[in-house]
Image (cartoon, helix red, strand yellow):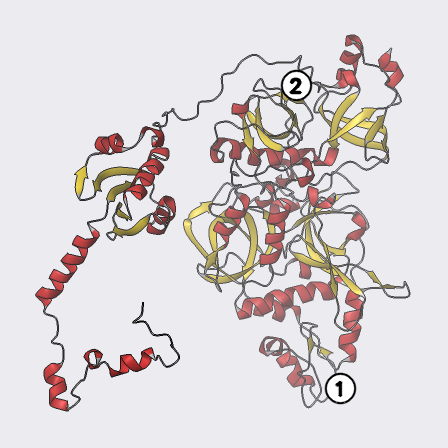
């Protein structure tokens, strides 16, 4: 202790290190010496020895050789599976399903064995190495402590549908239907039948191929307001909204009100604004243009319009006389109509069904000619006289609605107040009042029709959902498609060419796109289901003397009957085709039990229908209310499927209470009511009453007579 320094103030360890010459290394920086003393490059044989030594060093760690059973397992997933703190490295060859996993120590390897025992369906152990010794899987298990052992999982067969035991009716709190009524099928009345094509009729002359014999009206839901089709657009220069209604492939402008509440027609306002802005009307097509003759100021649009009036203009230019359009010369310059050639450009004018569209040529000359025909119809239709009597099938008329004037052909006049017409320049079918129809001259009626129907190849015929309707409105009108077809694909039954439409900008097929929108996707069993509020509900309006169609009367004992508006009954049958296709071909789950209040697709009498689960009893038969009909039936879980979100069809059937019933009916009274309100029958009720809670009731004047 005496040898230790008492004063450490002058001690400097850096000075001692600096003075120690043994730790100093000097390099001769002269050029030749640097080359001679530089480290020589490693030989290839030494590099191989170095790599072999590195592998040998890694091989000293315990490892497992695993073969994956699931193709989606990656190196990163395997690292997370065993835990990053346990794994040292993982080797895997390209396009190989075998992994070599090196672990930090034996404890990490034991943990990996436990993980593999818990999830044997993911990986298969092929070989393992403990501290330099190879061991089989049986030896590895014997080395594990008993406390860390995990028993082998019990291998069970795939899910087997539950046994169909007896139905427990005593435990149910909701009354099920008393009778097993068969769901009614509603078939639409054809718009045109074979009698309309009798020899010598106008329809047989105008439609020699009987094209409209197979035409269906697909816009019942649209007419009853099931789809919201009106959109408001704000003008840049004013705050007054312009309401634009999209329907059947055309733009229909509705009358709007200005700030003072005065009605203003949008089309007239636009026309007035164009006249005041310096534009003039073309003498040939009546369109707006700024091109005029420098001598006589005659306005014309382009070369086509000039070719129509050039001969008369040369005679009358400078004389002060006006040019009169020669109808015969005008028709000679218009291209021929018909199916456009293969690989030609087309535009969609209207959708008739989910798999039928009307197209027209989109080349420059045909595009100009198409709008010339519309302009001619507009020009002659403005001065057309109203029909003095009801039209007949096949008659060409002028159809005026909102601010539009188009040509139409009459298809059906069974209801004098609701006449069915087809707008021949677009292809859309509509019902209208006779007051909107005007006389059409033979010149206008004989102008070419450029709208041609084609069948979308591979697209099924399905009832239109609101989503699909929005898609149709988005792709028609302005988008240009390439028409591809082969003559052997002609549909002789419906007189249409089957074709494929390709969008030129993104090279995407319209057929596959619509088919994807139409096809429902089965949701995962882990996903939450939808309740009844997910679907819109369309009920008959309150009022007197309203026709309803009976969809179910199995709960008449409790004074309840289910009905749908008479005009919408056929829509229920249209939807059914989609539900049937989903239950038979798309839904793969063998069993499904929807929670209380959730939508589902259930099988009833061999047909798949949509419903809502009302009650789960525990016997394997949930109580299902079939929304489109109204009956409540216990359905086994093997006949139930999850409801897909793509099927957004509105609910058209409503539950009605019969006014005047205070007690349950007797069997004799129920029988009389069932005969009066037969399933599938169309009944006129004296009044429909709606209360504040949005519940509906029916009043029948002969109720007491039925009660006896």
Tell me the element at label 2.
loop
* Relative horizontal placement of residue 79, taking residue 102 as reference (left or right): right
Quadrant showing the C terminus: top right
The local crowd at label 2, few if under 14, some if 14 to 19, many if 20 or more residues have their Cα within 10 Å, is some
| Residue drawn 9% across the image and 83% down it | 36
Quadrant showing the N terminus: bottom left
Q: Quadrant of residue 418?
A: top right
- Mark number displayed over residue 181: 2
Count of marks, rendered view: 2
The residue nearer to you, when weighing 444 against 211, is 211
Q: CA distance from mark 2 to mark 1?
A: 81 Å
Q: Is residue 533 above or below residue 149?
A: below
Residue of label 1: 320
* Relative horizontal placement of residue 330, taking residue 343 as reference (left or right): right
Q: Residue furthest front?
A: 2
The residue nearer to you, when weighing 194 against 464, is 464
Tell me the element at label 1.
loop
First-in-chain label (2 vs 1): 2
Residue 497 percent coordinates (x, y):
48, 49
The residue nearer to you, when weighing 367 against 626, is 626
Q: Quadrant of residue 463?
A: top right
Residue 380 percent coordinates (x, y):
73, 64
Q: Is residue 476 above or below residue 571?
A: below
Q: Is residue 441 visible?
A: no
């Amino acid at each position: 202790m005496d040898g230790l320094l008492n004063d450490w103030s002058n001690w400097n360890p850096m000075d001692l290190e600096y003075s120690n010459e043994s730790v100093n290394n000097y390099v001769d920086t002269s050029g030749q010496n640097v080359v001679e003393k530089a480290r020589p490059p490693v030989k290839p044989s030494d590099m191989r020895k170095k790599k072999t030594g590195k592998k040998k060093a890694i091989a000293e760690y315990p490892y497992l050789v695993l073969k994956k059973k699931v193709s989606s397992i990656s190196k990163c997933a395997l690292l997370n599976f065993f835990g990053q703190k346990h794994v040292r490295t993982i080797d895997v060859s390209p396009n190989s399903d075998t992994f070599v996993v090196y672990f930090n120590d034996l404890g990490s390897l034991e943990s990996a064995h436990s993980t593999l025992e818990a999830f044997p369906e993911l990986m298969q152990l092929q070989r393992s190495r403990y501290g330099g010794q190879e061991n089989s899987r049986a030896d590895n298990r014997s080395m594990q402590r008993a406390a860390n052992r995990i028993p082998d999982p019990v291998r069970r067969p795939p899910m087997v549908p539950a046994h169909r035991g007896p139905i427990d009716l005593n435990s149910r709190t909701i009354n099920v239907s008393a009778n097993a009524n068969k769901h009614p099928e509603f078939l639409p009345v054809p718009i045109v039948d074979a009698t309309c094509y009798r020899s010598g009729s106008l329809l047989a002359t105008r439609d020699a191929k009987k094209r409209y014999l197979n035409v269906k009206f697909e816009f019942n839901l649209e007419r009853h307001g099931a789809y919201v089709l009106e959109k408001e657009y704000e003008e840049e220069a004013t705050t007054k909204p312009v309401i634009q209604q999209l329907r059947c492939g055309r733009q229909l402008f509705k009358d709007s009100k200005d700030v003072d509440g005065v009605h203003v027609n949008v089309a007239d306002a636009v026309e007035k604004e164009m006249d005041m802005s310096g534009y003039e009307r073309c003498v040939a097509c009546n369109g707006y243009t700024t091109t005029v003759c420098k001598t006589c100021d005659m306005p014309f649009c382009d070369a086509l319009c000039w070719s129509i009036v050039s001969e008369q203009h040369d005679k009358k230019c400078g004389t002060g006389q006006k040019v009169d359009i020669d109808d015969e010369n005008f028709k000679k310059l218009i291209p021929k109509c018909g199916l456009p050639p293969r690989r030609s450009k087309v535009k969609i004018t209207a959708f008739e069904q989910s798999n039928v569209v009307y197209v027209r040529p989109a080349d420059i000359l045909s595009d100009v000619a198409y709008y010339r025909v519309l302009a001619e119809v507009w020009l002659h239709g403005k001065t057309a006289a109203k029909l003095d009597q009801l039209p007949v099938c096949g008659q060409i008329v002028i159809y005026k609605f909102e601010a539009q004037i188009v040509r139409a052909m009459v298809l059906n006049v069974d209801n004098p107040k609701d006449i069915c017409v087809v707008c021949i320049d677009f292809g859309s079918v509509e019902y209208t009042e006779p007051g909107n129809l005007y006389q059409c001259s033979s010149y206008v009626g004989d102008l070419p029709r450029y709208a041609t129907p084609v069948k979308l190849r591979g697209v099924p015929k399905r009832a239109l959902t609101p989503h699909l309707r929005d898609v149709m409105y988005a792709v028609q009108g302005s988008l240009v498609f390439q028409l591809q077809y082969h003559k052997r694909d002609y549909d002789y039954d419906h007189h249409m060419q089957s074709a494929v439409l390709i969008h030129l900008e993104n090279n995407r097929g319209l057929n596959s796109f619509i088919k994807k929108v139409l096809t429902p996707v089965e949701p995962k069993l882990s996903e939450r289901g939808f309740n009844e509020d997910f679907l819109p509900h369309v009920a008959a309006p309150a009022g007197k003397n309203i026709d309803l169609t009976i969809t179910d009367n199995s709960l008449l004992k409790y004074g309840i009957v289910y009905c749908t508006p008479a005009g919408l009954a056929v829509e229920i049958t249209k939807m059914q085709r989609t539900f049937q296709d989903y239950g038979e071909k798309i839904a793969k789950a063998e069993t499904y039990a929807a929670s209380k209040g959730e939508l589902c697709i259930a099988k009833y009498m061999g047909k798949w229908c949509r419903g809502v689960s009302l009650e789960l009893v525990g016997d394997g038969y949930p109580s299902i209310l079939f929304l489109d009909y109204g009956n409540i039936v216990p359905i086994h879980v093997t006949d139930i499927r999850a409801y897909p979100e793509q099927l957004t069809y509105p609910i058209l059937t409503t539950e009605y209470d019969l006014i005047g019933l205070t007690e349950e009916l007797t069997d004799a009274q129920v029988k009389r009511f069932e005969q009066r309100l037969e399933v599938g029958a169309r009944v006129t009720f004296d009044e429909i009453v709606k209360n504040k809670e949005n519940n509906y009731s029916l009043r029948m004047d002969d109720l007491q007579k039925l009660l006896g």
